[in-house]
């Protein structure tokens, strides 16, 4: 073969785009870096995470600096709403509560004191007050008389079907609830202002709804996170041991799980309260007894599949201990399902605590939780709906945020969706 002489003319320089043709343009990411990236791309999950952080920070730190404590009560300021219709008499402002008592306020909505009553005219259904020498009369007789008339006629109608209640019902529906007079002048609200003293109003004992909702959030969140922590620790260890050991030990351990799960959580709470009394601790213990069961079943199923994988067999052949295999090999490979399950247990525990407090099996007064606040508002929710709506809204927002974040976390941890 003849020698071939090579010259520079035989070579053509590569273009820039040809040089970069096989260049890796995307940074290599670990599994958890990819999870973080995909979680950030999920806008719903990130908004939910922000909502969760705001709720936690508000419940933990705001009560430390708020000037009113959750047990403080002023009966004179009971059942005062978020917005107030204020009246003016000779430069003085007042607000009338649901019991037709007058409360002195400033023009911007700051509560001052309950105005002293001069005369309670029960016969004529009137309250009489004095404002700087001017007599102010709160007359609630029109609605009272219309209601009495309707009730009397309704009793007669039960015995006589020919009696028509239409006119009496019309009079009742259109009767004025109350009429306020200053001398001969009928007073009407001069402004509608926000309650500056109690930003979310007060309950039937004059306690601040805002600080009680935040304090109730503390109770509910403590229960939720403690249940999730116990669920994580006991469930992972118990389920991991049962799945890894297998055989008769696995069978016995899972039958124990079946026996415990057969007893309702409510029964555990009742039995613990008989021994320990009302409070947060019986609920925490009851949830700690029952909430790890689902995690144990989940982890057991994961371990049964992973322990036959090559990396586990390799660790066993190298003489790795059971503890090392569990903690260094099996648990890290199950962290996706474990984290999702633990996150979803938090809203479940919060709702369980709220339900138990709602039926009277939670914290006792003056302590508050979201469930007990809803229970306290049942008697007056038709008249003061905000007392039921506000704690119910807090429960709904928190549980929804945790559930949406759990869904986003599950999607981020799903290897099938990795791109």
Image: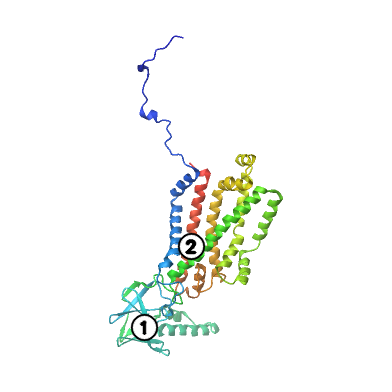
Image height of 50 relative to 175, above or below: above
| SS assignment at label 1 | loop
**What is the C-alpha distance between the residues marked 2 and 1?**
38 Å
Residue 243 at x, y percent in the picture: 65, 49
Residue 300 at x, y percent in the picture: 63, 50
Disc number for residue 19 = none
Mark toward the start of the polypeptide (2 vs 1):
1
Disc number for residue 115 = 1
State the image quarter where residue 75 is shown: bottom left
Left or right of 195: which side holds 263?
A: right
Q: Badges 2 and 1: C-beta atoms under 8 Å apart?
A: no
Left or right of 23: which side holds 346?
A: right
Residue 139 at x, y percent in the picture: 38, 85
Nearer-the-camera pick, 207 or 375: 207
For label 2, the residue is: 396
Image height of 110 relative to 314, above or below: below
């Amino acid at each position: 073969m003849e020698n071939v002489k090579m010259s520079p003319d035989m070579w053509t320089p590569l273009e820039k785009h040809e040089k970069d043709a096989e260049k890796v343009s995307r940074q290599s990411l670990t599994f958890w870096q990819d999870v973080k990236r995909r979680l950030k791309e999920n806008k719903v999950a990130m908004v939910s995470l922000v909502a969760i952080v705001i709720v936690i920070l508000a419940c933990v730190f705001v009560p430390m600096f708020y000037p009113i404590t959750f047990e403080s009560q002023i009966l004179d300021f009971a059942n005062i709403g978020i917005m107030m219709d204020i009246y003016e008499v000779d430069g003085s402002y007042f607000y009338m509560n649901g019991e037709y008592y007058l409360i002195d306020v400033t023009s911007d909505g700051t509560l001052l004191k309950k105005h002293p009553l001069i005369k309670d005219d029960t016969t004529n259904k009137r309250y009489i007050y004095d404002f700087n020498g001017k007599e102010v009369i709160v007359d609630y007789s029109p609605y009272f008389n219309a209601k009495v008339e309707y009730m009397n006629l309704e009793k007669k109608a039960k015995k006589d079907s020919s009696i028509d209640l239409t006119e009496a019902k019309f009079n009742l529906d259109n009767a004025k609830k109350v009429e306020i007079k200053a001398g001969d002048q009928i007073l009407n609200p001069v402004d509608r202002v926000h309650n500056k003293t109690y930003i979310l109003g007060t309950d039937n004992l004059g306690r601040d709804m805002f600080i009680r909702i935040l304090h109730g959030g503390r109770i509910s969140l403590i229960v939720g996170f403690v249940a999730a922590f116990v669920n994580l620790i006991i469930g992972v260890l118990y389920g991991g041991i049962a799945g890894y050991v297998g055989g008769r030990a696995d069978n016995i351990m899972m039958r124990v799980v079946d026996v415990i799960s057969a007893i309702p959580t409510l029964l555990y709470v009742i039995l613990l309260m008989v021994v320990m009394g009302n409070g947060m601790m019986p609920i925490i213990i009851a949830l700690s007894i029952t909430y790890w069961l689902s995690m144990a079943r989940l982890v057991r199923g994961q371990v049964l599949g992973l322990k036959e994988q090559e990396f586990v067999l390799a660790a066993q052949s190298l003489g790795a201990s059971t503890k090392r295999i569990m903690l260094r090999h099996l648990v890290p490979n199950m962290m996706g399902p474990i984290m999702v399950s633990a996150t979803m247990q938090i809203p479940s525990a919060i709702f369980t605590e709220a339900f138990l407090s709602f039926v009277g099996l939670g914290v006792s007064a003056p302590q508050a939780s979201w469930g007990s606040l809803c229970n306290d508002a049942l008697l007056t929710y038709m008249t003061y709906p905000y007392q039921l709506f506000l704690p119910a809204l807090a429960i709904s927002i928190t549980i929804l945020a945790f559930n949406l974040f759990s869904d986003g976390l599950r999607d981020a941890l799903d290897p099938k969706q990795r791109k």
